[in-house]
């Protein structure tokens, strides 16, 4: 059998693991500097915890885990039952004939009560009034003299079988069956498990609760270049406070982290309340989503394109005219002034502008205004944001956003716990990796280098080498011995391929003289010194 | 909806994450000091990569992932088909009647060929000669004059329906259906994915290849105290070399790691070749497993118990007599001497003793003989070990083994790649955690402490605090500000609950005077100093 990776997954070799760790460690360190504490949740959750939180598309993309054991037990009973449906129908017809022959008082319910032979599927088939009517009609018809009994029978059978098909088909619907054969699913993001954790532990947590979480998530997306079915999310959230200082702190956290990673970034900021205010101002509140989706494309399709799309969505010329100041790439300060005028009577919009200005002003106060950009076109997809929204763009590379987040009104409402407002940001590990790679910014020392390879000259010499090795490792120096006394060339090649810096010769003569010979594989330089000197 | 964790899984809060990281970082550091490099494989693999590698029980315990989309497509067709089975049988009987009436040349195949109305399930039912014979017999019977046709029909129908039941039941067998509705599964251990990786990349890897891997694995085991459905494995393996120096190195790696974790341990060592040799010596090679399973219990059930169990397994008195020197708790040196005598003509046993002595002697040479114990009763479960086997026992606590491993002949044979011998060891993270907890050995500083909480006096003061905060974080000091200007008592409580060391007051007066007031929450000590002094 030829082994392969599952679709959309990756192995990470040493260099990749080290480089990913370099990013993760940097983020982790900064999360902690800002008072966030780590949380880890399990890879899988109860399916009911996850479904219904990500929309229909999201539900489809959740990886479900098949129940263990005889997960088909229930389904199987249904299936086997369906084998009986034809004979059940025959039995029904027999009974009807008996009623006719004996002149009994016929009702469908009476017939069904008579016998507990009928299968579950058949009983489901005759449950509806519509089918009962059909059976009654059959009874009345065949009771007449001039009717072809065999023909009526065939007609009835075909109707009942059709119904049984519909019921059966419905039962073995993949989507519906999931609930019967799967009760667990892989984590789809870090937010819902976090919400589940907060809802479960609200009594014991200290609020505001600041947690960071760096773990993989899984999505059954069609794999594409740069899009995988398993990938890491790195999230920091504060819940239990509506203070706008969080927004300021999270902007700082973003900037400090990316500065340390040496990635030049701009943070785009907007506020959902401003977008809602604009819709209210233009009297298109019902079309808020159409409006923000179109506005979000301004960069790509220009003013003309946006206006065209708004018209296609049946937004009135009047509304478009009122909003047109947004499409002219005016400086952010000018847009802000217009917004303030327009929002004179729009409470939510006024409130959004105030929130935005608080963040902008306090970031200016901290000297980080240059990297923070008010971007009125920023909308972000997730429905649950209710205040500030962020997106981070790397400068000098083509690479969508490498981070994003925002404020939400309630994290845990879906789990029945109210009044847990919060704000969170996320770092896109895979994209950050690609940016650092493209800008050639991975530090040389992000990899753990093995400094020495002891050449193996045979059992006696190797035994001596082992002693020196143990001392080196005690000092925290990574080193190893070639496991066999192979040809020196082979041992050389091993060291070179593995990127080991120095080869060490500890042969019979060296041992006798208490020496050690070190050859630097980069410079080619070679020197023989006392073992004690080497170790100190 | 009241949220809960999926059965057998855990959340890890800050303290637990930090403590687990302390263990993982220690292991990782030591793996690297010994020249091992990291590898990470995906959480799920193709199901075919995993099945058949862990025995029947293991296959059952693999978590399978349900295919996305309409995973029941195939099953559904079968199911709906089964709704037709009764009418198919009726049709068959009609056809048979036609043959009788028209005196045609009857064979089952002719009848079936006549019509493509018959469903797939029915065709499967009549595929076997046994069923064809039954139909032929029916034809011959009903062709006779004195036979009750209706009775014969009912008999035939019931036989065919029974067969259809068997076929259908077989088709919706949970185990068999897995292959149709699941093509992926969660990692069950780290060894098989490692083997898959080596087999896929053999052309580009440098051998001997030394990798370590620290990742979670998942097993659908019944959860118990200390046994979870998601847990970490920490493995180090060298493949591509048979050198016994690896055994010596891995003993050192174990000892150095546990020394650093301050856990006193003994490493038990044995060799599978010695066990095979003993079976050969006693002429019970076919009962090797019965023998080792019984021997493994010597500690618990004593000599008498072992002898009793061997007898129950039909091992002869003569063989037991030959092996009895093993059951007397003789010193290891004495057992070794007896083994050498007994193995005079047992090649595999002799070889095993030589290997063992090489490891023991070279460990002695390195001064680590006290912690290495030859234990002839050690067997270990996994079938694939072929040479040295190890188990690590923590001293002074009741806690099975906290690590284990051994040498194997071929890692990648199941994937069609030969000649990849190797040796590996594993650290049991959860048990190590419990031991360290029980011995109270977690270092104080394994947690990242937040050193300062700035009290929040309101917008103006907070803005000043933010500036000082930024400088502290720049210096790598973790600090935060309480997000709201709540009552001081509330802010106090927050700091205490979160374990923050100091509270900082930066009120109006302090700001005017360029001062800062620091209150140590442990000692209660409070002092006011210049901000510059504080920052330097």
Image (cartoon, coloured by chain):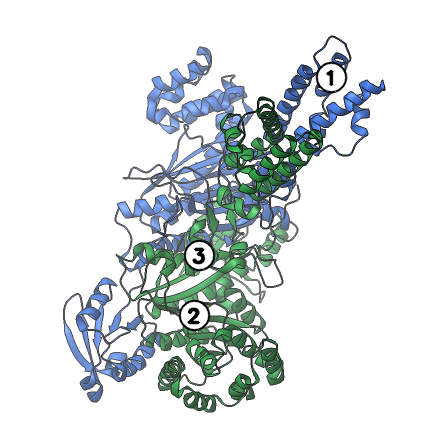
Chain colours: A blue, B green
Which of the 4 image quarters holds residue B225?
A: bottom right
Pinpoint the chain carrying mark 3: B
User: Of discs 1 and 3, which sits in the foreground?
Assistant: 1
Pinpoint the chain carrying mark 1: A
In the foreground, B484 or B264: B264
- Which numbered disc flags the more N-terminal residue, 3 or 2? 2
User: Of discs 2 and 1, which sits in the foreground?
Assistant: 1
In this view, the residue farthest toward the front is B145
**Marks 3 and 2, how far apart in space?**
65 Å
Against B64, is A531 above or below? below
Give me the disc on residue B531: 3
Q: Please rate how many residues cluster around mark 2, counting C-alpha atoms within 10 Å: few if below 14, some from 14 to 19, many from 20.
A: many
User: Of discs 3 and 2, which sits in the foreground?
Assistant: 2
Which quarter of the rendered picture does the C terminus of chain B lie within?
Answer: bottom left
Q: Is residue A448 left or right of residue A53?
A: left
In the foreground, B190 or A1: A1
- For residue A384, say whether it is visible: no
Q: Please rate how many residues cluster around mark 3, counting C-alpha atoms within 10 Å: few if below 14, some from 14 to 19, many from 20.
A: some
How far across and down, in percent of the image, does residue B92 sit? 59, 28
Which of the 4 image quarters holds residue B422?
A: bottom left
**Marks 2 and 1, how far apart in space?**
71 Å
**Marks 1 and 3, how far apart in space?**
89 Å
How far across and down, in percent of the image, does residue B376 sit? 49, 82
Is disc 3 placed on a helix, strand or loop? helix
In the foreground, A372 or B179: B179
Which of the 4 image quarters holds residue B88?
A: top right
Q: Which residue is mark 2?
A: B385
Q: Is residue A186 left or right of residue A436?
A: right
How far across and down, in percent of the image, does residue A384 sit? 53, 34
Q: Which residue is mark 1?
A: A133
Which quarter of the rendered picture does the N terminus of chain B lie within?
Answer: top right
């Amino acid at each position: 059998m030829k082994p392969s990776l599952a679709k959309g997954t990756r192995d990470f070799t040493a260099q990749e693991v080290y480089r990913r760790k370099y990013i993760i460690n940097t983020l982790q360190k900064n999360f902690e500097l800002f008072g966030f504490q780590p949380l880890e949740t399990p890879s899988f959750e109860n399916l009911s915890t996850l479904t219904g939180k990500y929309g229909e598309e999201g539900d489809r993309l959740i990886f479900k885990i098949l129940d263990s054991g005889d997960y088909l037990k229930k389904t199987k009973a249904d299936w086997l039952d369906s084998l009986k449906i034809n004979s059940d129908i025959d039995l029904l017809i027999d009974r009807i004939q008996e009623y006719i022959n004996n002149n009994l008082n016929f009702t469908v319910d009476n017939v069904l009560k008579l016998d507990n032979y009928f299968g579950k599927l058949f009983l489901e088939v005759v449950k509806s009034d519509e089918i009962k009517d059909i059976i009654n009609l059959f009874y009345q018809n065949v009771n007449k003299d001039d009717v072809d009994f065999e023909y009526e029978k065939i007609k009835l059978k075909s109707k009942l079988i059709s119904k049984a098909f519909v019921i059966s088909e419905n039962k073995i619907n993949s989507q519906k069956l999931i609930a019967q054969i799967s009760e667990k699913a892989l984590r789809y993001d870090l937010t819902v498990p976090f919400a589940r954790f907060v809802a479960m532990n609200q009594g014991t947590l200290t609020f505001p609760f600041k947690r960071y979480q760096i773990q993989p998530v899984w999505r059954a997306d069609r794999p594409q270049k740069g899009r995988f079915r398993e990938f890491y999310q790195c999230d920091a959230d504060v819940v239990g406070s509506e203070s706008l200082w969080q927004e300021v702190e999270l902007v700082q956290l973003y900037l400090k982290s990316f500065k340390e990673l040496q990635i030049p970034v701009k943070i785009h900021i907007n506020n959902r309340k401003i977008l809602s205010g604009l819709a209210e101002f233009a009297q298109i509140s019902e079309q808020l989503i159409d409006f923000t989706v179109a506005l979000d494309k301004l960069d790509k399709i220009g003013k003309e394109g946006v206006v065209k799309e708004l018209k296609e969505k049946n937004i009135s010329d009047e509304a478009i005219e009122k909003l047109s100041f947004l499409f002219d790439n005016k400086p952010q300060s000018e847009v802000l002034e217009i917004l303030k005028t327009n929002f004179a009577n729009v409470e939510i919009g006024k409130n959004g502008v105030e929130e935005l200005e608080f963040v902008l002003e306090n970031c200016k106060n901290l000297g980080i205004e240059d990297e923070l950009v008010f971007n009125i076109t920023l909308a972000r997809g997730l429905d649950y944001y209710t205040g500030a929204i962020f997106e981070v763009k790397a400068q000098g590379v083509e690479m969508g956003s490498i981070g994003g987040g925002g404020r939400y009104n309630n994290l845990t409402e879906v789990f029945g716990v109210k009044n847990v407002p919060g704000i969170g940001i996320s770092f896109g590990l895979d994209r950050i990796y690609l940016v650092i790679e493209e800008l050639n910014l991975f530090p040389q020392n992000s990899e753990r280098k093995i400094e020495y390879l002891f050449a193996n000259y045979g059992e006696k010499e190797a035994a001596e080498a082992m002693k020196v090795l143990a001392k080196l490792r005690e000092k925290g120096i990574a080193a190893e011995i070639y496991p066999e006394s192979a040809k020196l060339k082979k041992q050389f090649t091993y060291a070179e391929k593995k990127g080991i810096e120095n080869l060490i010769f500890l042969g019979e003569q060296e041992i006798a003289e208490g020496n050690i010979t070190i050859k630097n594989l980069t410079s080619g330089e070679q020197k023989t010194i006392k073992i004690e000197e080497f170790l100190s």
